[in-house]
Amino acid sequence: MKALNLGCGRRKMPSREDFECVNLDMEPSMEPDIVADFTQQLPFEEGEFDEVYLFHTLEHITKQLHPFVFTVIRRVLKVEGILYLSYPEFSLICKNWLENYKGQREFWEKTIFGRQLYPSDFHVCAVDSVELTVLLEECGFREIAYKAETSLPYNMILKAMACDLPTTRERLVFDEVINTK
């Protein structure tokens, strides 16, 4: 099995005998296997991966790039490959900040805006599970399910399966004009 860990940061996944994982990040100081900006393109073949992980990375990418990012991820996943996402549910963290939940206003503010430890460590968009589900369906994913993390119920975990993309005029134009290597 082959997996891709996008925006890995310091959370690199090790490869094992039966599991190869490629850790990719745009920040060289994170020392990933590959330094690349996947909001531009991914340097991999179509259908190369069984799984793609995008853990606490989506909120660091401007929302206008989300359709492109998911289309690129869909391209490198095998049909029936799995995308795993984790992200803070914006409505929940805002509510916790407003209510100063557990007296941790500073923590909730950092959850809203990012820790801001280095240039790409800012949250630049709100993530909403329902809106995200619609976008993933438009980008070629099915069987989408999400739930709150048990220990951190304001963080969501989403699982989506890549499916065959219908051949539409828009898809052909995208593949010819935008999704070229």
Image: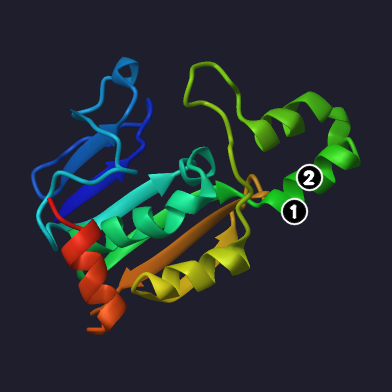
Say if 103 sits above or below 16 in the image: above
Q: What's the residue type where badge 2 is placed?
A: Cys
| Quadrant the N terminus occupies | bottom left
Q: Residues within 10 Å of mark 1 (few under 14, many from 20)?
A: some
Q: Is residue 80 visible?
A: no
Q: Nearer the viewer, residue 79 or 46?
A: 46
- Residue at x-position 58% and y-position 38%: 124
Q: Which residue is mark 1?
A: 91
- Residue at x-position 54% and y-position 16%: 117
- The x, y position of residue 38, in whole percent, is 30, 42
- The x, y position of residue 58, in whole percent, is 48, 46
Q: CA distance from mark 1 to mark 2?
A: 5 Å
Residue 16: image quadrant is: top left
Q: Is residue 17 left or right of residue 118?
A: left
Q: Residues within 10 Å of mark 2 (few under 14, many from 20)?
A: some
The circle drawn on residue 94 is: 2
Residues at discs 1 and 2 in contact (Cβ within 8 Å):
yes
Say if 108 sits above or below 137 in the image: above
- The x, y position of residue 167, in whole percent, is 22, 84
